[in-house]
Amino acid sequence: FRFKDSLAEDLRSADLVISHAGAGSCLETLEKGKPLIVVINDKLMDNHQLELAKQLHRDGCVLYCNCSTLVETLQSMDLSALKPFPPGQPEKFASFLDKVFGLQ
């Protein structure tokens, strides 16, 4: 499909997600606890997607590749080696902001 309002149902039923490295796509998938292979778009200027994919890979949460190495990645992947994505802690961020702005 070219466009869909929400991927929530697709993510719920997925055993594996293959996605571009957009922050929203990556985080939504990881928050649902789904294994993720991130496919980098090498054509992007400054390639910010590569930075995100590399960090998530260093953290052990995703596998990443480019279009030309996707098949190889699928053939050699070990999804059991992926670590769960840690849950967010928005209360810590809110507390930090309160301190910065002198509200606490």
Image: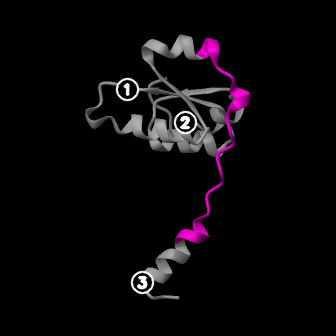
Examine the image and state in which quarter residue 59 appears.
top right
Q: Could you say where residue 42 lies in the image, as x and y percent from the top left?
A: 34, 25
Q: Could you say where residue 70 lies in the image, as x and y percent from the top left?
A: 51, 16
Residue picked out by circle 1: 41
**Which of pointers 3 and 2 indicates the residue nearer the eye?**
2
Mark before the other along the chain sequence, 1 or 3: 1
- Residue 25 in view of the camera: yes
| SS assignment at label 1 | loop
Mark before the other along the chain sequence, 2 or 1: 1
- Rendered position, 104 above or below 54: below
| SS assignment at label 2 | helix
- Residue 15 in view of the camera: no
Mark before the other along the chain sequence, 3 or 2: 2
Classify residue 64 as left or right of residue 43.
right
Residue picked out by circle 3: 101
| Mark 3 neighbour class, 10 Å CA radius: few under 14, some 14 to 19, many 20 or more | few
- Rendered position, 48 above or below 94: above
Disc on res. 57 = 2
Q: Which residue range is magenta in the image?
A: 74-93
Q: Are marks 3 and 2 in contact (CB under 8 Å)?
A: no
